[in-house]
Amino acid sequence: MINKSKADQALSLNLSIEALRNSLKEHNYRYYRLDAPLIPDAEYDRLLRQLEALEAESGEPVPADSPTQTVGAPPSHTFTSRQHGEQLLSLANAFDAEAIEAFVERNREGLGLEADDQSVQFIVEPKVDGLAINLRYERGVLCIAATRGDGTTGEDVTDNIRTIADIPWCLQTDAESNAQTNDIVIPDVLEVRGEVYMSKAAFADLNARQLAEKAEPFANPRNAAAGSLRQLDAKITAQRALSFFAYGAGLGARELAASQSALLSKLHAFGFAVQQTAMAVDAAGLLQRYQSVMQQRASMPYEIDGVVYKLDDFDLQQRLGAVARSPRWAIAHKFPAEEVVTLVDNIIWQVGRTGVITPVADLQPVAVGGVTVSRATLHNMDELRRKQVYVGARVIVRRAGDVIPEVVKAIDVDEQAVFPVQPDVCPVCQASVFKLEGEVALRCSGGLSCSAQLIERLRHFVARGAMDIEGMGDKLIARLVEEEKVSDIAGLFELNYASLSDWTGMGEKKITNLQTSIQQSKQRPLARFLHALGIRHVGSATAAALASHFGSLDALMQAGEEALIAVPDVGPEVAASICSFFAEAHNLDVIERLLAAGIEPSVPEQQVSNHPLAGKTIVLTGSFAAIARRAAQEQLRALGVKPASSVSKNTDVLIAGEKAGAKLSKARELGIEIADEAQLLVWLNWQ
Ligand code: IVH
């Protein structure tokens, strides 16, 4: 019986089983043959799982050529086909801790061991994102290199493979590299398996060259590696800086080693690059390694998309065997997908603090790079058109590392699609819109009479790192603006508190607290006050540099462009922006009222000399929630701190944010003082 709801769902996506099979075959072809996929891997996996479910529910026999039954694509006719000596298996994927616990449990059970047995070792290897290659060595000499193809037969790419420096033409057997393995016997036939990949740096170079030559850039390093390897002219492959990691062996493996870890050392001794691995005896240990590899991911020189766990001992591997195309003794634990597909529910126009009107996509919530995303900026009209985004579009959303999620582009663009047009009046205040010369940004001409701009400006003013007015949340700001209690930032200090007392939810205590925090904010140092003013191009780092250079608000306000340019990091554009800010009558009026209300922005003398970090060498690593790393570095510099980029014995303190990785481990090793973000904020706000 067909499950109605799922079948309906498939039909609603216009995908019957047959259509889904055809669509997946086309995606296979584009991925394996053309090296130019249209959809992210996660979307491909989703479609494949959907087909699997529909096939299971239909009860019909599944044809042998269904994408659920095949691996990759059959070899092309351009390259000669080569049958592998031993089949190249694939790996089952796991995405969560439960699946890993189940994997360990299955392995123990299959080996007749107790559920909590700790006697067998698993090896953990990073999963390199490239393409699998089988290298056939006969009596130590490379004879054939073939792509995986369908696992049994692949394409002969020997000439191209010979251009890769990491791949030895002859296995090294000299005494030096085999110092610990001098019992080395090279099997008559040895199939070395591993991944051809392109490093992040080589990928960036290649795409820059592609763009310069007006050629289509590659979607990712893996496609670039695959495309480069399957060139008909090996000279082109040679220019593409490909690399290789060995991770296994087919024929000859057992003659060489009794375990995966021993095999990797032998392969290394033969002259292959192998990755760093670790061992674990239970699921907790495996998951710990997964976390630590994930933390290193962004700083690794090549792309990885997960880790692979393998039972280390070859005899035990053999006892467990394989199901279909994947071994029971290994599994890939994938990292959260960095690119996924979702639907655009709406496109709204958001008005920012400086009046820039930005198109923003409201998305169907989707998990990407480990977080759920439901909104993404489309930046401006040019970007929106280039990415072909419209309401109802299916779009690729990307979030890599700590980077802000972005819409990459729309896929399957509907011919009937109606693309949004840019508004000719501000969507909030209806004032006319304009563009500055040479800019693509659309701006509202309403200034502070535009409530959106006013709200954003107030939010920025009261934020942490700026005036830090506790209790002044988004809702309160919106209400103050809506009810016209405040019409600019100075208005916050001229509030009539009595008039708030009849507001629901505004008890006496809340009002007193608010009054206290507004009062306290009057003592904020000059750097924070300048940042809070929201002068174009003046972020927290520039504000700190200006404050320590000029020492007072007055001196800064008097400074001409030339004097401003003398400040480190201040260029002509920033200087011009500062001058025009202080030349505007409305801004001068606001500043005058702020000062009249008792604001005393100053640069405390002791700030530099008495700061607990003054003169110390500190390293910042990881990401921080309240402040960008560079901004923190700049502010610390202004406090007399010496920021450094790498941890050494000369480091005094390491300040570690979220996802701190190698630097944190090194600091621990060296016994260096480690501080967290909360401590960083205390230090930055020292007065
Ligand atoms: S082992 C029987 N180890 O991932 C085990 N594969 O999704 C076969 N890959 O086809 C593969 N890094 O192309 C193994 N350390 C690693 C790997 C790795 C990347 C690739 C390989 C394989 C695919 C399976």
Image (cartoon, grey):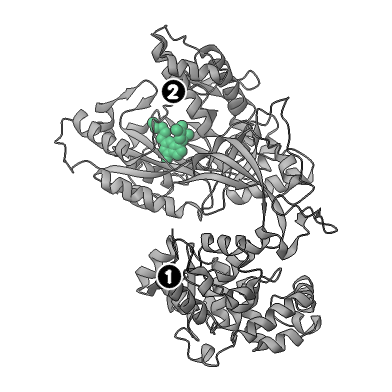
| Residue 430 image position (x, y, % from top left) | 75, 52
Apparent side of residue 584 relative to residue 184 in the rendered image (left or right): right
As shown in the figure, which amino acid type bears the numbered disc 2?
Gly
Q: Which mark is residue 510?
A: 1
Whether label 1 lies within 8 Å of ligand 1 gets the answer no
Furthest residue in direction left, as rendered: 114
Q: Is residue 648 above or below residue 325?
A: below
In screen coordinates, is 236 left or right of 298?
right
Q: What is the spatial separation of the Cα atoms under label 1 and label 2, in whole angstroms? A: 77 Å
| Quadrant housing the N terminus | top left
Q: Residue 633, position in %: x, y?
A: 55, 73
Where does label 2 land, which residue? 85
Describe residue 184's horizontal placement relative to residue 398 as left or right.
Answer: left
Q: Residue at x 71, y 29 (%)?
A: 417
The kind of residue on which mark 1 rests is Lys
Q: Residue furthest top?
A: 60
- Rendered view: 557 above or below 71: below
For mark 2, does the 10 Å Cα neighbourhood hold few (<14), some (14 to 19), or many (20 or more) residues?
some
Q: Earlier in the sequence, mark 1 or mark 2?
A: 2
Report the image quarter containing ligand 1.
Answer: top left
Q: Residue 173 falls in which quadrant of the image?
A: top left
